[in-house]
């Protein structure tokens, strides 16, 4: 899937047998065609698997690792007894992602500064393998951090992929009633932190206006765009300066911070329109190098959140998407 930037893990052409399951001399190896069939099934459902695990983990790199493990299990299992390959692969992927989340909890607690998900270029796949683009927005992925691993799995499967409760129950190994409770609790957690959002066109217009005002340190212009309790979060991974190590809250505080750093931060910066996680974003480049992905959330009252992804280790997927779409930029943002 182009949007994920992920490799096709375990492709059968990567060992000495070659892509058709034959030895270098041309003699066919036993099971070669069967292996090709297994790879074809995996490749077909891979976009959806990536969509599930990325939403759960908020990390392209970790999602690709999970898919690699899923492929190994699919490759080594007795596939003759698997009645529904897609169900098997979805269950395996989701359970592996739950395991990763359980071990990642401690890492997130010790993360330096605000944590934001690794952005993905969704230009060619706005819903990222799902029926709808739910649980994909950067701000919603941040809210998913409030959920337990099992709640997150149930919410993603139900809201983004429209899985039946019976299927969710099988995947997370609970009763249907418990699966319904998981989704209900998850919805309440998300709703408590989620604000109503503006239409895509207005969101892009607000982003353009924000970049224009922030670039020149226009204090009044910024304050006019913001809600009273606007929040600015910058994920630098503790390795990029200047970047606030804590969220900055409040119209006046955020505007003053941006004004103070305007000349230093925006010098030599070009803002490129992007489509990230299903929504409008701006890629900030200096000397042709992407160093930040800027997104925001907004309601009718104004800009609610400004999210700066500046961690170099999380910009790879968008950089790859940019290099593949060179010369195809769309709209203002300068």
Image (cartoon, rainbow, N blue to C red):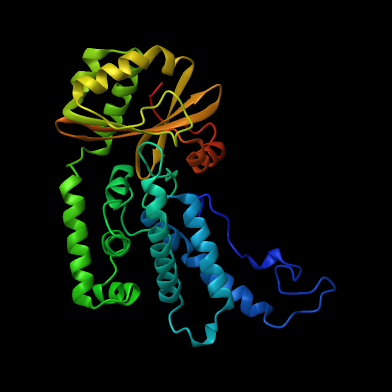
Q: Residue at x 55, y 68 (%)?
A: 71
**Along the line of sight, which residue is nearer the eye, 280 or 224?**
224
Vertical order, 45 against 7 (above or below): below
**Along the line of sight, which residue is nearer the eye, 311 or 3?**
311
**Horizontal and vertical percent position of residue 41:** 52, 72
277 vs 166, left or right, is right
Answer whether residue 52 is visible to the viewer in this image.
Answer: no
Farthest residue to the right: give it: 25
**Horizontal and vertical percent position of residue 255:** 25, 19
Farthest residue to the bottom: give it: 81
Vertical order, 113 against 164 (above or below): above
Q: Residue at x 56, y 37 (%)?
A: 323
**Along the line of sight, which residue is nearer the eye, 251 or 197?**
251
5 vs 243, left or right, is right
Q: How many numbered circles does the render carry?
A: 0
Answer whether residue 193 is visible to the viewer in this image.
Answer: yes
**Horizontal and vertical percent position of residue 330:** 42, 31
Vertical order, 17 against 210 (above or below): below
**Along the line of sight, which residue is nearer the eye, 13 or 113?**
113
Task: Point out the image quarter for the C terminus.
Answer: top left
> Dividing the picture into quarters, in which one does residue 31 lie?
bottom right
**Horizontal and vertical percent position of residue 13:** 69, 65
Q: Residue at x 46, y 19 (%)?
A: 269
């Amino acid at each position: 899937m182009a949007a994920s930037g992920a490799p096709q893990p375990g492709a059968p052409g990567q060992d000495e047998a070659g892509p058709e399951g034959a030895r270098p001399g041309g003699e066919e190896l036993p099971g070669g065609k069967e292996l090709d069939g297994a790879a074809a099934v995996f490749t077909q459902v891979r976009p959806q698997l990536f969509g599930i695990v990325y939403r759960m983990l908020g990390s392209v790199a970790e999602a690709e690792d999970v898919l690699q493990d899923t492929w190994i299990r699919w490759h080594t299992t007795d596939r003759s007894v698997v009645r529904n390959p897609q169900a098997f692969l979805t269950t395996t992927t989701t359970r592996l992602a739950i395991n990763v989340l359980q071990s990642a909890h401690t890492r997130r607690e010790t993360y330096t500064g605000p944590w934001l998900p690794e952005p993905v270029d969704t230009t060619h796949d706005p819903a990222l393998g799902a029926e709808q683009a739910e649980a994909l927005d950067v701000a919603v992925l941040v809210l998913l951090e409030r959920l337990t691993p099992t709640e997150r799995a149930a919410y993603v499967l139900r809201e983004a992929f429209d899985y039946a409760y019976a299927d969710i129950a099988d995947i997370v190994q609970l009763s249907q009633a418990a699966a319904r409770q998981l989704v209900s609790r998850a919805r309440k957690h998300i709703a408590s932190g989620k604000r109503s959002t503006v239409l895509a066109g207005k969101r892009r217009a607000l982003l353009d206006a924000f970049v224009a005002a922030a670039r020149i340190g226009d204090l009044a212009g910024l304050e006019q765009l913001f809600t009273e309790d606007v929040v600015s979060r910058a994920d630098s991974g503790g390795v990029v300066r200047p970047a606030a190590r804590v969220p900055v809250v409040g119209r006046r505080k955020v505007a003053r911070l941006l004004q103070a750093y305007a000349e230093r931060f925006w010098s030599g910066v070009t803002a490129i329109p992007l489509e990230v996680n299903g929504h409008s974003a701006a890629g900030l480049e200096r000397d042709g190098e992407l160093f930040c992905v800027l997104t925001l959330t907004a309601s009718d009252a104004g800009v609610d959140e400004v999210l700066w992804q500046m961690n170099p280790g999380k910009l790879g997927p968008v950089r790859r998407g940019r290099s593949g779409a060179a010369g195809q930029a769309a709209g203002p943002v300068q």
